[in-house]
Amino acid sequence: MAKLTIAAAAVALAALAGSARAAEPVMVQCGREYQAAKAAGALNGMDWGAFRAACAVRLKAAPAAAPTAAAAPVPAAVPAATPSAPSPASAPTAASSAGMAAMHARQKQCGAEWTANKATLVAATPGLTWPKYWSQCNTRIKSTGR
């Protein structure tokens, strides 16, 4: 059995949907196209987010009238996604992961100090709240390099 491409699935869906499709929100239209492409096995590893983004761009660029099977645009902006290669923007770097781990460690340390000394801290500094204490404690720990 031959696999349908995303463009072919979109054309088939547009032909079935008729003029009622033009009144539907973009998200609904893209959802139907995604389900049709998924059923046809034409996603080629593309996830819903990438498909929806490309579909929304394509539908917003199309005229307001419902497309016919012959006039349905080919989704040229739909890249072939590879599940094994995350995009550079979504892949965490070692530096950001190490920085986040250090920040979480400082937050735990400051939280333990806050819990243990809350009564005396608030008595010594009226109006002191956790966010204010966290800011001061975080700055203090960063400056001492602990």
Image: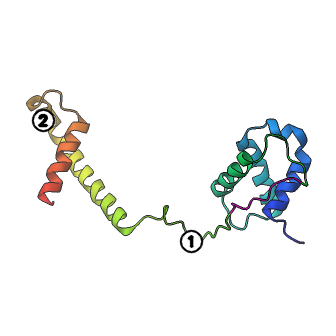
Residue on which the image places disc 1? 85
Residue type of the residue flagged with mark 2: Leu
Q: Is 33 drawn above or below residue 3 in the view shown?
A: above
For image coordinates 86% across by 51% down, the residue present is 13
Q: In the image, is 102 to the left or to the right of 57?
A: left
Q: Earlier in the sequence, mark 2 or mark 1?
A: 1
The kind of secondary structure element at disc 2 is: helix
Q: Dot 1, crowdedness within 10 Å: few (<14), some or many (≥20)?
A: few
Q: Is 29 drawn above or below residue 40 in the view shown?
A: above
In which quadrant of the rendered view does residue 42 lie? bottom right
Q: Position of residue 94 (x, y in %)?
A: 37, 69
Residue type of the residue flagged with mark 1: Ala
Quadrant where the N terminus sits is bottom right
Q: Is 83 drawn above or below residue 36 in the view shown?
A: below
Q: Position of residue 101 (x, y in %)?
A: 32, 60
Colour scheme shown: rainbow
In which quadrant of the rendered view does residue 8 lie? bottom right
Q: Position of residue 34 (x, y in %)?
A: 75, 54
As measured in the structure, the alpha-carbon distance from the residue carrying label 2 to the one carrying label 1 is 49 Å
Q: Which residues are magenta?
A: 71-78
> Residue 132 or 118: which is nearer the viewer?
132
The kind of secondary structure element at disc 1 is: loop
Q: In the image, is 100 to the left or to the right of 41?
A: left
Q: Is residue 67 visible?
A: yes
